[in-house]
Image: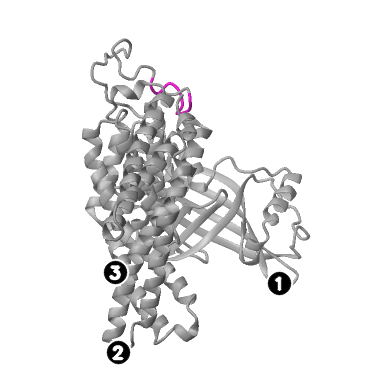
Amino acid sequence: MADTVREIERKYEADSTTRLPDLAGIDRVATVVEQGVEDLDALYYDTPDQRLTAAGITLRRRTGGRDAGWHLKLPARPGEREEIRAPLSDVPPPELTSLVRARVLDRDLVPVVRLRTRRTVRELRDAAGAPLAEVAVDEVWAWPAGEAEKPGAAGVAGRTEARWREIEVELTGGGERAPGLLDEAERALAAVGVHPAAAPSKLARALEETGLRPARPEDRTAAVASGKGGAAPRRKNFGEKESGKKGSGRKGAGKKGPGKKGTAGDLVLEYVREQLRVIVELDPAVRRDVPDSVHRMRVATRRLRSAFRSYTKVLDRGVTAPVGGELKWLAAELGVERDREVLTDRLVTAVADVPRTLRLGPVDARLRIWSERHRAESRDRVLATLDGDRYLALLKTLHALLEDPPLRPGAGRPAPEIAARAVLKDYRRLARRVRTALDAPAGQDRDVALHRARKAAKRTRYAAEAARPALGRPAKKFAKRVKRVQQLLGDHQDSVVARGALRELATQAQQAGEGGFTFGLLYGREEARAADRERELPRVWRKASRRKYRAALRP
């Protein structure tokens, strides 16, 4: 079973002459207690092209010390990492390797570098004796994995043993509630000539100083996902000459950023790259059931699919359509879990609003049983999706698309021109669907039409959001207006889904002899709520569809 801790620390350069200052008295620190010396032996794993390192992730097997075992460190906020721990074993444990599957794809994880550390630990405590932080002075030896059994052994040409000294200050216990402690410790260290380390981690320094090569520029898969990669190579457009001069469909593409002076290709590829980065980064969060992670990952898949459908003047639809189909599949699989979350929250809130005198029978228990059963089913389905071959193939396809994008001649046009056309085209589609929904007879036909309008609103909003670097504030305001339409239609659709669930709950309650009065009452409330949204739609749509918002988009 893996355990998770939040690592909040800072690293500093040191040498044989460095002496720690007296840290008693800074912030809430009352005493500094010697904790002795630890000998640590760590073997770091990565792919041969160092995809984890490129993403700021470390995976190691460490013996010695108080936390021997496997450690996977994932970036969190700046200066913070999530450290996920598993017991010692001979090979990387599946509960950790699954969390980096979206990074390594089908590459093997192999030993890369070995570090031995002699650590002298001091604990900073408050006046009550509670620990606030640890200060460690580390003597570190590093060398390529497998090239030597102990420090001092000869390496191979171009690869050497590295040795250095550093200081770590890490918050522990109550220190996590004292954000100023690290700043005060840093000022005290600076006063004696100790400065922040240049390398972000021991691994990064070991790779640099032992001559082990980092991820190669031409192998950008990990870098693309993390947003750290440079411009990717591309396909030539139809009619484009090798020189990229006259006849090129993307003249000058890639020379400028995705802003107002860049090309449409720059704009769209940067947006696609960002959504892929979000999907890959959220993969371990979804696996660990982090709140809201499923929703955010699903939104990224939908934004990516919408970009392929909206910006067909930039990316060849013949290539992106099959990819879009796979993204639709992934969004649907994630949607099972997300829709359950939204529906459960809605029903729990609705039941809580019912007076106790009208809550007849074990309503809360019935709802809890229903929710837990559906949660188990949806959770298993999400994990099976992320562990499956189809998901892995989709990620590889997206990386390949960014490596060799199927650009059309419009990719070389100015970004504002193409972006405005795409957004306005999606708007016209939305307008048609809203008119159809408003004209539809009440009941199922209108529900279906409103649901189709909601999806069109979402696509229009995403197109406008993607266009913001090129169109600026007008795109932001337009997206905000369309979002209000989308939210209203979304609440209407949630009501449709909730009524279906309430019918199911009422049936189950009746079959168990509990009665379905309360669920029927909630059904009626949902009907009224949906009717309210239908009455509000014309007013909200009039505001969103004002000509001035569309006129402002045109460059």
Question: Is 121 above or below relative to 418?
Answer: below
Disc 2 marks which amino acid? Gly
Residue tagged by mark 1?
129
For the residue pair 240 and 550, the one nearer the viewer reads as: 550
The verdict on residue 259 being magenta is: yes
The answer to whether residue 509 is visible is yes
| Image coordinates for residue 117, horizontal then vertical, percent | 53, 54
Residue tagged by mark 2?
513
Q: Would you identify the image quadrant in which residue 130 lies?
A: bottom right
Q: Of the residues under marks 3 and 1, which one precedes in the sequence?
A: 1
> What colouring style does the render use?
one colour
For the residue pair 155 and 465, the one nearer the viewer reads as: 465
Residue 166 placement, left or right of 212: right
Label 3 residue SS:
helix
Residue tagged by mark 3?
377
Find the magenta span and give its range: 253-260
The residue located at (22%, 52%) in the rendering is 389
Q: Nearer the viewer, mark 3 or mark 2?
A: 2
